[in-house]
Image (cartoon, rainbow, N blue to C red):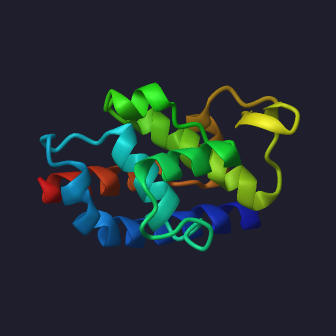
Amino acid sequence: MAVRAYIGTVLLMIFGTAVICAQSETAEIQKEQKAVLTHKYAAVVFAKRAGMFDEYVDSDATLSDCVSFMNEQGILFSLSDVVSQKIFTSKDCARVMGQMSLIFLGEAKREFGSVGMIVLPDHVDSWEQYCIMNGVEYKEMYKKLEAAVAVSS
């Protein structure tokens, strides 16, 4: 349990720092929007700026590259949600951070065996519950993402 709490804390620290670094890129991504946290913004931050995948995703990767990479890892960013600039909710943040936590714990199981989205572990009802049980501080990360978007607009 201590390892899970440590990973949750480390994820929040890395993501928090990454959000600050991503603020300059936010201006480009969010030009046509007014302080709205979208799947588009979140996909780029989690893929390129979160400090977890930056050795695999180039700093000049396109939005499409970021979405493709995340989906290949089993962290779902629906193309329609990204293109339609759907609002990225706290619940979405819990899912993404929970899926990332499972990847880094080596416990990720996918929908269709070796492919598809990473699924919730057995006996867990929601990604929010998973995050709370495992010390993944998704609410704090969500607040940091919202604040970064607000600063950039």
Towards the viewer: 133 or 86: 86
The residue shown at (86%, 39%) is 114
Q: In which quarter of the image is residue 59?
A: bottom left
Say how many tags the image has. 0
Towards the viewer: 132 or 146: 146
Q: Position of residue 92 (x, y in %)?
A: 47, 36
The residue shown at (41%, 38%) is 90
Whether residue 64 is situated above or below residue 4 in the rendered picture: above
Residue placed furthest toward the right: 113
The residue shown at (16%, 44%) is 35
Image-based side of 153 in relation to 89, left or right? left
Q: Position of residue 7 (x, y in %)?
A: 65, 65
**Residue 61 at least partly seen:** yes
Q: Position of residue 17 (x, y in %)?
A: 39, 73
Q: Where is residue 45 in the image (x, y as percent from the top left)?
A: 42, 57
Q: In which quarter of the image is residue 1?
A: bottom right
